[in-house]
Image (tube, rainbow, N blue to C red):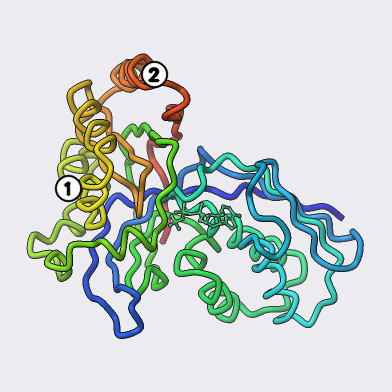
Amino acid sequence: MIAEAKAVSKLNLYLKVTARRPDRYHDLETLFLPLGYPADRITIDFDAAPGIRLSSSLAGLPENLENLAGRAALAYADAAGISPTWSIHIEKQIPVAAGMGGGSADAGTVLSLLSAHYGRVAHDDLAALALTLGADVPYFLSPRAATATGVGDRIAPIEGILTVPLLLVVNPHFPVSAKWAYTNLDRSRIGEDSEQRLPRLIAALRAGDAESVARLLHNDLAFALYEKFPMLRQLREFMNANGALNSQITGSGPTMFAICRTQEERTRLAARLRETFSSETITVFEEIPTGILEISR
Ligand code: ATP
């Protein structure tokens, strides 16, 4: 039997580092938004040769158990007491080491597919297992608009109807490791948000108020990234001068997103970006499905 599923990417519309933990990880307060594009496609053949074989469409992506999705499969097999005969393929579209959660999305989707097929691991145990693979993996077990605290693993879906503004995503073609971004975080910024932007941002999403959403975007990791990579500063200035209501870096970067008022403005901004920056240096993802996102109770 073969099963397949889409592994969606994510944006962080808000990311505050609230504390540095004794284990050197950081406590966060963040708002995750799932994106149906860019997204990966995961296929699992359950009746392959004994073992776990993982391949991908992207040359250079780690294969087999070096890939986070392969490690997820092995962890599931161990937890469920299964001798695997699985061949897993990743059709890669999410930019790698880009702050869009690509590896975590693949790993979470593999766990969801295996769990749907075998159902041997209880939901809470699956979330705990996901966390052993990475802080963002639990989120991708059921990616929805959500806030997260802890290391990003304590997830609370945002209730009600959200109207997500028009988004454009730009991926500059250089990787940034999350480790670099956290190591270079300006320590003086660590702490609670005195401006209470997160609840205001959620209210703006509920109200469909794109201007306020744009104004409330925040990422504590962005300051060091703008400092180190002038291209990110340049992209932000360019997008904000060419029709974006605002733009920001997602997660540990370098991918950026812009909020636009209308489809026409988004189309124009995408065209200007492509005219100004070569296709060797950036990829523009324009047709991001947004609008009314979800109703969860
Ligand atoms: P995050 O937003 O969670 O910080 P990211 O987008 O910065 O994630 P990933 O794309 O997940 O980072 O990749 C980080 C590293 O993990 C890469 O250097 C890559 O080689 C490795 N990796 C292992 N498995 C995968 C996978 N399935 N997809 C992408 N990268 C993977």
User: Could you tell me which residue is drawn at 67 percent across and 49 percent down?
Assistant: 5
User: Could you tell me which residue is drawn at 17 percent across and 23 percent down?
Assistant: 241
| C-alpha separation, residue under disc 2 versus residue under disc 1 | 27 Å
* Residue 232 vertical position relative to residue 265 in the rendered view, above or below: below
- The residue that mark 1 highlights is 216
Q: Position of residue 269 (x, y in %)?
A: 31, 20
Q: Position of residue 289 (x, y in %)?
A: 45, 34
The reply to whether callout 2 and callout 1 are in contact (CB within 8 Å) is no
Q: Nearer the viewer, mark 2 or mark 1?
A: 2
Q: Earlier in the sequence, mark 2 or mark 1?
A: 1
Q: Nearer the viewer, residue 215 or 281?
A: 281
Q: Tell me where residue 25 sits by quadrant.
A: bottom left
Q: Nearer the viewer, residue 191 or 195?
A: 191
What is the three-letter code of the residue carrying label 2?
Answer: Arg
| Labelled disc at residue 101 | none
Q: Position of residue 68 (x, y in %)?
A: 61, 62
- The residue that mark 2 highlights is 274
Could you tell whether 236 is left or right of 141 in the image? left
User: Could you tell me which residue is drawn at 12 percent across and 67 percent down?
Assistant: 188
* Image quadrant in which the C terminus is located: bottom left
Label 2, secondary structure: give it. Answer: helix
